Image (tube, rainbow, N blue to C red):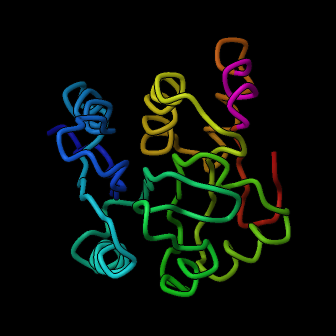
């Protein structure tokens, strides 16, 4: 019997007010699922209330196998933009999830969201109890970040070591793109790349 692949819980923001726009992280998630690398849950969110509802649901016992949280949102330093009208800070997200992300790996596919002090991110990890957080410190290009996302998500789900993404980002193949996008990893023990 083949074991089920690990799970990714993804919340994606309302990228703009154009309802006909089709930009999404869904093709990346679909690709990885079709390859048998992951299972995923994907939800769109445009308000803090929706985000909190979905995060609360994700953290319920029912979805315990979805140990990777993927926040596909616009961003700014320590902030997540859900829509043009709504923003949630990492501190607020941390208070919603306090003590309930034990062992989870959090990925912020958001421009500049991890441009923060080591102290700020260590406090976020202490509060949430997540094993690690990773994401971008710079403004990112959609296509470049999508290329990196495929290997990051696969590694977050299937890497047996919590530092498997960091190890991958130091390889000759991925290091230049990771550096160009300002990809950063911070661990619960305080270590940061």
Direction from residue 12 to residue 171 in the image, left or right: right
The part of the image, by quadrant, that contains residue 179 is: top right
Vertical relation: 12 (above or below) 143: below
Q: What residue lies at 33% left-to-right and 60% top-to-bottom? A: 66
Q: Which residues are magenta?
A: 175-182
Q: Position of residue 14 (x, y in %)?
A: 33, 55
Residue placed at 85% from the left, 70% from the top? 119
Residue 29 coordinates in the image, percent (x, y): 29, 37
Q: Per the image, is 142 magenta?
A: no
Residue 12 against residue 180 in the figure, above or below: below
Q: Nearer the viewer, residue 3 or 109?
A: 109
Q: Is residue 177 left or right of residue 159?
A: right
Residue at the farthest left position:
1
Q: How many marks?
A: 0
| Magenta stretch, main secondary structure class | helix
Q: Measuring 24% from the left and 53% from the top, which residue is drawn there?
A: 42
Front residue of this view, candidates 115 and 190: 115
Residue 72 drawn at (x, y percent): 43, 50
- Image quadrant holding the N terminus, namely top left
- Horizontal and vertical percent for residue 24? 30, 39
User: Closest to the observer: 108 or 133?
Assistant: 108
Reply above or below: 152 against 189.
above
**Quadrant holding the C terminus:** top right
Give the residue at the far top of this rendering: 173
Q: Quadrant of residue 83?
A: bottom left
Apparent side of residue 55 relative to residue 133 in the rendered image (left or right): left
């Amino acid at each position: 019997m083949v074991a089920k692949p690990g799970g990714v819980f993804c919340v994606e923001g309302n990228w703009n007010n154009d309802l006909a726009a089709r930009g999404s992280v869904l093709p990346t998630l679909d690709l990885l699922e079709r390859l048998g690398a992951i299972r995923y849950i994907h939800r769109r969110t445009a308000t803090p209330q929706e985000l909190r509802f979905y995060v609360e649901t994700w953290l319920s016992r029912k979805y315990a196998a979805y140990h990777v949280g993927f926040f596909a949102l616009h961003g700014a330093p320590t902030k997540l933009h859900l829509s043009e009208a709504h923003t949630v800070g990492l501190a607020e997200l941390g208070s919603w999830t306090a003590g309930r992300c034990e062992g989870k790996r959090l990925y912020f596919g958001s421009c500049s969201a991890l441009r923060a002090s080591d102290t700020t991110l260590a406090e976020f990890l202490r509060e949430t109890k997540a094993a690690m957080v990773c994401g971008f410190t710079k403004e990112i290009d959609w296509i470049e970040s999508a290329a990196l996302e495929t290997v990051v998500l696969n590694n977050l789900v299937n890497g047996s070591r919590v530092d498997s993404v960091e190890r991958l980002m130091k390889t000759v193949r991925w290091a230049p793109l990771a550096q160009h996008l300002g990809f950063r990893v911070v661990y619960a023990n305080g270590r940061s790349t």
